[in-house]
Structures are given as structure tokens and as C-alpha cells.
Image (cartoon, rainbow, N blue to C red):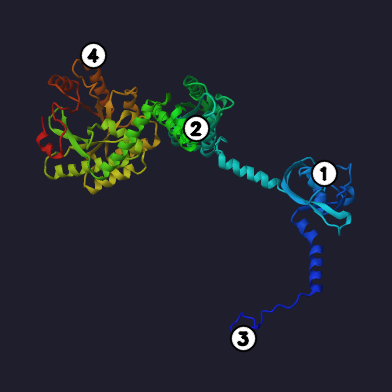
């Protein structure tokens, strides 16, 4: 039925199709048949048609090239090219190739080509019975060379599952290996051990010597680690400086410990890298599967075992690095408590639940207050007062030390400005603020200090930043740059707790500082001898020769104060002279 023409474009007036033209259809089919060989060759598709008797009826140019034959006539039994053709066909079911039934088979076939190169072909074999054809039908082979695709796929798979630098398995791959090992271990005796390895101080190597040297250190670590494990063990690099070894069929905990100790020995000592002698070491955490882990789902068990090994590794680093620690359930509890405390600390900072006390520092000569040290206080709602020695390491570990330090610095400068405005302190008064190595290493720390001093209209000499000798002797170039920049701007730097580290004397000459604070254990406490007094006097003389003032901490008795004054200490600090208290209590403690 014809449509009514409404004048709209794109509408025909009649949908009735004309009858097909048999001649045109025949011409199109003929054209397609004539074009098909050229199209197949252009697509590099090899096509071979055989009769049920095995004789080759037809083959396109691509097939002849693939088989190494000059013409179809060369594809005869006994010929090398024909043998290669039969080897391709032999991959398909025998009854199909023999023409016993119609059907199609597809698959990838590995072959050696005519010039002896390994190749991979994606082949399709089809058998069709047709009485109208010569011989009653045919067996056809269509093949594409997918060698390059297979190689590229393998390359991409390797990149997805292996570390680009070391060639070891990556985190994704080792997680799969560990899950499979746990699943297999459930049905046989023994344990799976996860050994977590962290390269000590890799960041400092990168900062001081460059990332190229750091990469060479990682490559050397990977090689030594691979050489130290059993043949059946699996090694992976799972992070910047972290490696993981999965050991299956470990008979007991003692064996796991021996395996880890072997790795420790291989990864500790001196390493020669391009005329550089590096002393390197690793911290190792070991976790062994138990009934609790094996009872979990594979994915959960995998994450738990790696987490346990990671926890043990952090215990090794906290204990001083260069050691191996075996995971215990108590560590899990302690790690959970640290995580919870870290979250509560972050919340306490945000909600301003922390307070600051100030303890005055006095001139040993004039007995007037010349400074005050800011001491952070945290009164937990459930646990009561928590000592800074307990929560500062957690702040560093959880990443909130920057916010915490900024809070202390800001409050200290605010109170200093108020004391100056009220005429409570003199022109030589400075507030002392403790800073960590992490803060000093931050590239924005110097700008933060400068901007806060400007904000509160304070001269740089009004601020003393105290850092422990271990932080100042870390060989971290970022710390060194910050210290130099701060001192150049006029901010004073103090070496805190002097006398507690192994490199106490070297810190005097290796670190640029303005003030040396003697730890209370060195500042002639009760029971000190005359020899102790002479040692302190010698330290004071050396510090003065290097342009440093000396502060004695934890002064608790009049006799101790007298002896410290006799050694030449410039300033004194302690509960005998003035206990820590809130900022508004300082006006009552300006002299002793």
C-alpha cells in the first residue's frame, strides 16, 4: 500500500520493493568470488582447500608463502610444505579432518615455519559434505599468523604482573601466589611463611646520592634476595623499598626464622656501586600461617598474613632497624591500639583538645628567665594524661606530626607575642619549640616558620627550634638544608638531649647549632662525681669554642645547680627553678 506524500523529506511514496534482478545477483556473486583471493591475501589470511582424499584443491598466495611452497602443485605428499600443512591439520580432531562428519574446529597452533622460526597460528578447520562438488565436499583450513599478537600479549601480561625495575613479581602477582599457597597448604602439613623486607634508609640514599644510585641498590637487593631463597620460594617487590617472599611447606616457625635470617645475612653489609661504598641493611618481619589464618577465606587470609608480616617489620624498624622480628598476636593488639590512638590524636588536634605548658629557662648568671620551652599535653578522655614520649612516635607514624607541630608552633608564638606586649619578658627572651626530623625534612617547613613569625610580628631570634641529635645527624640533605636556612634567617637551633646518643661528641662538630642542651643524665644529677663535673666542664668549653650556649636540663637540687654554674653553663632549666605550667603562670616565674 502506498504512503501519501505529505511533502516531508526522507519519506518515499511507496515502500514496495522491486523484485530482485537474477542477473544483478549473479554478477555481484561473481565479483565477490573474483575479489576474495585478493582480499584474503591483503588480510594475510591463509586459505587451503583439500579434498577428502587429502589432495590440495586450492591455496591462496598467503597460504603458499606461509607453507614455503612455490605453487599449489608443490603441495604434494612427501614435500616439506605439505608436511607442514598436515601438521597444522593434525591439531584438529582426526574424524573431522578425515571428512567423517561436518563441523568446525578453532584453536591456536604452535609451529616452526619454513625458515625455522617459531610461529603461532590461529587456525580454523571446517569440513563440509556437498554432492554437487567434486569429490563430494572439502576440508578447509583458514589460518592467521598471531605470533606478534601472542608476544605482545605476553609482554603486557608480564608488565601487569611484574615490577618494571627488578623484573620480580609485583604486589598483584604475589597476592595471587600467596592465596594459592594458602589454599594448597590447607590440605597438607606445614605452614606458609610471609617474609616482609624493607630496605633501611633508601630515601636517604635517593636524597643524598640520587635516584639512579637508589635504583642500583634496589637491583642489587633483588639479586641478592633471589640468590638467598629456596628454589620453590617466590620473591616480589611490592613497594618502593619493600620486598615480600612467600615460602610454602615450611615445617615449623624455627625454619621460617632460619630462612629469614639467611636473607638478613645476604642483605646486610657493604655494597660497591660504581665507585661508591654503601653500608646497607634491611628490616625484616616474619609471619607464619596458623589455624586462625587458614580458617579464613583465601583473600582475607592473604591480607592477614601480609599485614602480620608488615606489623612485625615495623617492630623491627622501631627497635633500631637491621634486624628480624617474628610476628606475635600481641603485636596485632598493639598495632590496633596505635592505629586507634593515632585516629584519636588526629581528632584531638582538629578539636583543639591538646594544651601546652611552658617551663622557663633561666640565665645561670642573672637568674632571670631568658626563655620558655613549650611542652605539649594530651589528657585523653579515657586513658587520662598521655606522655609525649608515647604519642609523638604515633604522630610520626600516622602522618599527623606536621599538623601537631604546626599547632604547637602557632600557640607558642601567640603566647610569646602576648608576653612581650605585656612587658613580662625581656629583649633576649626566646620560646623553645621541639621539632622532629620529619618536620625538618619537609620542603615547606622553613616557609611555614618564616610566615608565622611575620604573622605574629616576632623577630627570628625569639624562636629556638630544638631537635634531638639523632634527627640532626640523620645524613638527610633536606634536614641539613632546613637547618642552614633557618639559622641564616635568624632562627636559633638547639641540640636537645645531648649525651644520650652514640655520636654525642661528633654532633658538636658535624651539626651547626646555636644552643646545646645537656640531657638530665649528663647534667650532674644526684650521685655525680668530681670526674663527672670535669667532663661537663670540658663539654661546656668545647661548645663555647664552637660558638654555642649551653643549657642544663632537669635541675632538681641546689647542689646540682651550684656545680652546674661552676662548670660555666649559660642557662639552667628544671623543676627546682620553675615547673611546667600554663602560659598565664609565666609572669610569676621570671626569676629564681
Q: Name the residue under label 4.
A: 531
How many angstroms separate mark 4 from mark 3 (CA)?
Answer: 120 Å
Q: Kindly identify the residue that appears in the image at 79 percent across and 70 percent down.
A: 25
Assign a secondary structure to mark 1. helix
Q: Position of residue 279 (x, y in %)?
A: 47, 25
Q: How crowded is mark 2: few (under 14 residues within 10 Å), some or many (20 or more)?
A: many
Q: Name the residue under label 2.
A: 243
Q: Residues within 10 Å of mark 3 (few under 14, many from 20)?
A: few
Q: Kindly identify the residue that appears in the image at 11 percent across and 34 percent down.
A: 589
Q: Name the residue under label 3.
A: 5
Looking at the figure, which quarter contains the N terminus?
bottom right
Which label sits in the foreground, 3 or 1?
A: 3
Sequence-wise, which precedes: disc 3 or disc 2? 3
Tag 1–tag 2 contact (CB < 8 Å) = no
Which label sits in the foreground, 4 or 2?
A: 2
Is residue 394 found left or right of 588 in the rendered image?
right
How many angstroms separate mark 4 from mark 1 (CA)?
Answer: 98 Å
Give above or below for 123 relative to 168.
below
Amino acid at each position: 500500500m502506498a504512503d501519501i506524500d505529505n511533502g516531508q523529506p526522507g519519506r518515499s511514496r511507496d515502500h514496495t520493493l522491486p523484485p530482485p534482478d537474477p542477473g544483478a545477483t549473479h554478477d555481484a556473486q561473481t565479483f565477490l568470488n573474483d575479489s576474495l583471493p585478493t582480499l584474503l591475501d591483503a588480510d594475510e589470511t591463509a586459505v587451503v582447500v583439500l579434498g577428502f582424499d587429502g589432495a590440495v584443491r586450492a591455496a591462496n598466495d598467503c597460504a603458499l608463502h606461509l607453507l614455503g611452497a612455490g605453487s599449489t602443485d608443490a603441495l604434494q605428499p612427501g614435500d616439506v610444505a605439505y608436511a607442514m600443512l598436515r601438521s597444522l591439520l593434525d591439531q584438529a580432531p582426526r574424524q573431522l579432518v578425515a571428512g567423517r562428519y561436518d563441523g568446525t574446529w578453532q584453536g591456536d597452533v604452535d609451529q616452526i615455519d619454513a625458515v625455522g622460526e617459531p610461529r603461532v597460528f590461529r587456525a580454523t578447520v571446517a569440513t563440509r559434505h556437498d554432492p554437487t562438488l567434486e569429490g563430494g565436499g572439502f576440508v578447509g583450513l583458514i589460518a592467521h599468523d598471531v605470533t606478534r599478537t601472542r608476544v605482545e600479549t605476553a609482554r603486557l601480561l608480564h608488565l601487569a604482573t611484574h615490577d618494571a625495575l627488578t623484573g620480580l613479581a609485583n604486589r598483584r602477582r604475589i597476592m595471587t601466589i600467596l592465596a594459592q599457597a594458602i589454599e594448597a597448604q590447607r590440605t597438607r602439613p606445614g605452614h606458609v611463611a610471609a617474609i616482609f623486607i624493607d630496605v633501611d634508609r633508601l630515601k636517604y640514599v635517593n636524597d643524598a646520592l640520587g635516584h639512579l644510585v637508589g635504583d642500583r641498590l634496589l637491583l642489587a637487593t633483588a639479586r641478592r634476595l633471589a640468590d638467598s631463597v629456596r628454589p620453590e620460594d617466590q620473591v616480589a617487590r611490592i613497594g618502593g623499598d619493600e620486598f615480600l617472599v612467600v615460602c610454602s611447606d615450611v615445617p615449623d616457625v624455627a625454619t621460617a626464622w632460619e630462612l629469614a635470617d639467611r636473607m638478613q645475612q645476604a642483605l646486610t653489609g657493604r655494597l660497591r656501586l660504581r665507585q661508591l661504598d654503601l653500608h646497607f641493611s634491611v628490616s625484616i618481619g616474619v609471619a607464619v600461617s596458623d589455624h586462625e589464618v587458614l580458617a579464613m577465606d583465601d583473600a582475607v587470609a592473604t591480607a592477614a598474613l601480609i599485614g602480620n608480616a608488615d606489623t612485625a617489620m615495623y617492630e623491627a624498624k622501631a627497635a633500631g632497624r637491621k634486624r628480624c622480628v617474628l610476628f606475635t598476636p600481641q603485636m596485632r593488639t598493639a598495632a590496633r591500639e596505635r592505629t586507634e590512638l593515632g585516629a584519636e590524636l588526629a581528632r584531638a588536634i582538629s578539636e583543639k583538645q591538646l594544651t601546652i605548658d611552658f617551663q622557663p629557662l633561666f640565665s645561670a648568671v642573672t637568674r632571670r628567665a631568658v626563655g620558655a620551652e613549650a611542652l605539649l599535653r594530651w589528657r585523653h578522655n579515657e586513658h587520662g594524661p598521655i606522655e609525649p614520649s608515647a604519642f609523638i612516635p604515633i604522630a610520626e607514624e600516622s602522618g599527623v606530626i606536621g599538623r601537631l607541630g604546626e599547632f604547637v608552633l602557632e600557640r607558642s608564638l601567640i603566647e610569646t607575642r602576648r608576653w612581650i606586649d605585656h612587658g613580662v619578658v625581656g629583649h633576649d627572651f626566646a620560646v623553645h619549640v621541639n621539632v622532629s626530623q620529619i618536620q625538618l625534612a619537609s620542603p615547606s617547613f622553613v616557609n611555614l616558620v618564616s610566615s608565622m613569625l611575620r604573622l605574629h610580628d616576632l623577630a627570628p631570634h625569639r624562636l629556638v627550634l630544638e631537635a634531638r641529635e639523632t634527627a640532626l645527624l640523620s645524613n638527610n640533605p633536606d634536614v641539613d638544608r632546613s637547618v642552614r636556612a633557618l639559622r641564616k634567617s635568624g632562627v636559633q637551633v638547639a641540640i636537645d638531649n645531648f649525651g644520650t646518643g652514640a655520636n654525642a661528641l661528633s654532633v658538636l662538630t658535624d651539626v651547626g647549632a646555636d644552643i646545646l642542651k645537656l640531657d638530665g643524665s649528663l647534667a650532674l644529677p644526684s650521685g655525680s662525681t668530681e670526674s663527672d663535673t670535669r667532663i661537663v666542664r670540658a663539654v661546656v668549653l668545647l661548645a663555647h669554642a664552637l660558638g654555642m650556649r649551653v643549657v642544663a636540663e632537669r635541675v632538681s637540687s641546689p647542689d646540682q645547680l651550684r656545680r652546674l654554674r661552676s662548670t660555666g653553663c649559660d642557662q639552667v632549666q628544671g623543676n627546682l627553678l620553675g615547673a611546667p605550667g600554663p602560659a598565664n603562670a609565666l609572669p610569676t616565674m621570671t626569676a629564681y
